[in-house]
Amino acid sequence: MKLTAFLRYFFGLLYPNLCAVCGNALSGREYICCLSCLYHLPRTNYWKEPGNPIEQIFWGLVPVEHVCALFFFSKGSRYRKLLHKLKYKGMPEIGVELGRQLGLELKNAPLYQCIDTIIPVPLHPKRQRRRGYNQSERIAAGIAQITGWKVNTSSLVRTRFTGTQTRKSRQERWENVSGAFALQDAAAITNRHVLLVDDVLTTGATMEACILQLKKAAGCKVSVATLACTKKTAAPVFGSPLTPAPADSDRHP
Ligand SMILES: [Zn+2]
């Protein structure tokens, strides 16, 4: 055994890497999540479903091609921890790894074959300095590793610092983010199909504000992909009979 491999093995015994979801020790081949938690991730499969419930959030508000999220998260779900650690516990590597998982789905999804550019939702520079990274950029990097799509961080900028969106109604969220973004370097996305990426889709207000800016570029099409969406957003939005959200399937012994 080489010295570096021995040291890795030795420190692994003292400080085992733990699964970010269930807390069990990870084996040498596992990263971030154990295989069991990854297998039981409550995937939405929305990348296969045109007109899915989260796509319908945008209907009548802003033109959008396709909308999907990798997994559902609900109150009490242990998969919420992934998002919390990604955003507030200084673990950007969770964004990259889950971005790769999302990339694996999108790479094989017929609906997403026309994407050519990924744009992560920008953070205000002040918040990015505080956090040390933009979680959406980390997710975009993971998607790009798998799909080969280019990441563009220059065309969409955040011009206004907005407070937290948590515990706000859709109207309040819209008032909070409306006008917080601006389009720069429109030529870079002219006639492009952009995949707009964020960590969570709840009311869609942030995405709507971003899409309004991106659509200022001539011929720009926009699709949306996030790591997670709440089951709340999968409920009927405009009173039409929509597909019910799948049953909670993120639990396993
Ligand atoms: Zn686990």
Image (cartoon, rainbow, N blue to C red):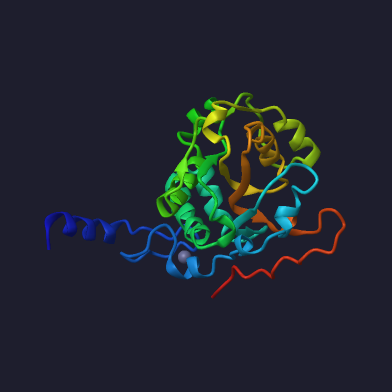
Image quarter where the C terminus lies is bottom right
In this rendering, would 10 be left or right of 155?
left
Residue 176 visible to the viewer: yes
Q: To which quarter of the image does residue 217 belong?
A: top right
Viewer-side residue, 12 vs 189: 189
- Vertical side of 117 occupied by 76: above or below: below
Image quarter where the N terminus lies is bottom left
User: Residue pushed farthest right?
Assistant: 239
Instruction: Give percent across and percent down for residue 157.
Output: 57, 28
Q: To which quarter of the image does residue 127 belong?
A: top right
In this rendering, would 225 be left or right of 4?
right
Viewer-side residue, 145 vs 175: 145
Instruction: Give percent across and percent down for residue 66.
Output: 65, 53
Residue at x 57%, y 43% (from the top left corner): 194
Give the tally of numbered discs. Answer: 0
User: Residue pushed farthest left?
Assistant: 2
Residue at x 16%, y 54% (from the top left corner): 4
Viewer-side residue, 15 vs 45: 45
Residue 91 visible to the viewer: no
Residue at x 50%, y 63% (from the top left corner): 108
Instruction: Give percent across and percent down for residue 143.
Output: 47, 51
